[in-house]
Image (spheres, helix red, strand yellow):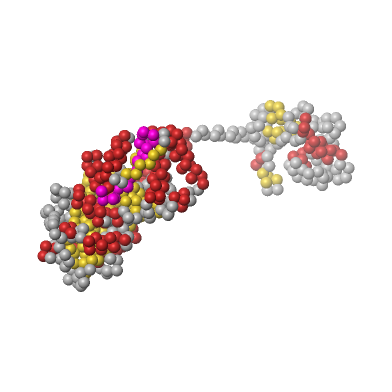
Amino acid sequence: MFMRNLEMSEVAPTAPAPALVRSRTMRCPDRYELNVATAYYDRPDILDAWHRMLAAATSPEALYQSPQFFSHLIDMQQGQDANYELFIVRRSIDYAIVGFIPVRTIKCGLEFRAGPVPLFKRTMRACQILGSVPLLDQAEEGLAEFVMQQLLKRFAKCSVLYMQAVPEEAAAALDGIAGVSSYVLNGWRTCHTQPLPDSVDGYLQKFSSKKRYNLSRQVRLLTEAAGTLQLLRIEEPGQVAAMFDAMDAFDASLDAPRAVEQPRLESLARQGLLLSYVIRCGDEDVAVVYGSRSASVWHIHKIACQQKYLHLSVGTSAIHLAVQDVLTHFSFKDIDFGYGMPNSEFRSTHVLKTRGVVLLHRAYSGTALLLKAHSKYDAMNEALIRQVKRLRKWHAQRGQAAKRPRPRPRSRRPFPERAHRASRNGRRVRPFSFVCRQGQGDGVQARIALFSGPRRHEQTDKPNHGNAPVYEDKPFGERNVVYMESQVQQHTTCCRDQKQNECQHGQAGQVCRTCCVHQQRKPGCRQKAV
């Protein structure tokens, strides 16, 4: 907090500033000067210029740069030492307003961790620039550099200038300031935002037909399980107590006790900045969506719901119903969910934006050394976390592999002959034994056994209906090459009854071993080899 109280007067001074304000003015000999305007921030000409610059603001947190939020800070600090201030930047030539800088003093903590476990914390005094991106006229050259240097001089007891949500693309404007360095606390992080269409139909069209059906089904199942559904909008001071009653019902507390948070939210509601929802089924509150609003953005800070309805996706249903109500009654451009990674990616509706907590500090100071050490330590800690995650993943995969049944190894018994090492025409051949029986007429059947595997079956002379093979058990190590009965008869006839260029490799009435078993044609065998 500041070391002195604000000087509040009943009659606001008029421009150009009188002695009271001139004594609290920091001049730039070239182009600009910095004025303290806390005492007369609500003067009509100041408010007109303020709203005009807010309409062109590029900050993702323009809510905290608004006159309404500054009024809220004044309401909450009545009777206490003020920790806020409003600066107006004017051009020295024509005294035109070219920037508004609302600030407040806070405590900034640097945590040193071992993995996720905090070891110790160093607390620094910081001057927070509300809205993160200063509300300045972009056409004025060198204005941002002037403002940052003057703020560091003004708040000499503060170690850093704190900006909690600076877009990555806007960080380049903060580099190159003479005597000032920047540090991104905990690195750049992703924020989920949701651009809003003009109507509920446009919102639903972003989903596939299956997703739309699932959303309506979730709402229907929640209604069947808990009762008739009601959507209560919380935007008035008298409605804040109902939201706290709902959160107390399922143990969802805010960042501070109710005795502190309820007056704060009632103050936001008086300024028109509160927009929250309570989803009630029957007589039971099942979910709360806590949020605030600016002119174009709805900020969602917390989603809380009953644990017993989590299996019905009550949180998703609450957001779905709240978005439809927002599209019906308001004209926001975006929904800002802030830092964090939700369980679902929401690819059809959400847009990821990269932001970071940026600390501006004096380039040659003890704070610079502290932040440098924190940067190195944080990098080592992140590397340690990645290594531990990699080891855990490897250990989990190894445990899953150990639980799988191992296949039984195939038995590799030696062949009865060594002929398998020989080759015929450059190809390896398997050893075999040939057995045949001579039958009556053309119905002779053959029995061929190859010693090359663990099958224990052999074709027999039993009746064969439909040319299906018939097996019987044989000793281990013998595998049959099964021929259909008609195939055996064809090859038998081929080798026995051929008159011209008769096959000489086997006796009449026998299956030709060379022609049929080894699949090699001889001049006397016109049938297709097996």
Lateral position of residue 210 relative to residue 175, left or right: right
Q: Position of residue 249 (x, y in %)?
A: 31, 34
**Residue range corresponding to the magenta coloring:** 270-287
Q: Nearer the viewer, residue 287 or 13?
A: 13
Q: Nearer the viewer, residue 418 or 146?
A: 146
Lateral position of residue 198 relative to residue 120, left or right: right
- In the rendered view, would you say 85 is above or below 33? above
- In the rendered view, would you say 332 is above or below 148? above
Q: Quadrant of the C terminus?
A: top right
Q: How many marks?
A: 0
Q: Residue at x 30, y 39 (%)?
A: 242
Q: Position of residue 169 (x, y in %)?
A: 34, 60
Residue 281 lies in the magenta stretch: yes
Q: Residue at x 71, y 35 (%)?
A: 481
The answer to whether residue 314 is seen in the rendering is yes
Q: Nearer the viewer, residue 261 or 355?
A: 261
Q: Position of residue 416 (x, y in %)?
A: 66, 34
Q: Residue at x 21, y 56 (%)?
A: 103
Lateral position of residue 252 relative to residue 507, left or right: left
**Location of residue 181 by image quarter:** bottom left
Residue 282 lies in the magenta stretch: yes
**Location of residue 150 by image quarter:** bottom left
**Location of residue 440 by image quarter:** top right
Q: Residue at x 26, y 59 (%)?
A: 182
- Name the residue furthest right: 499
The answer to whether residue 379 is seen in the rendering is no
Q: Position of residue 78 (x, y in %)?
A: 16, 49
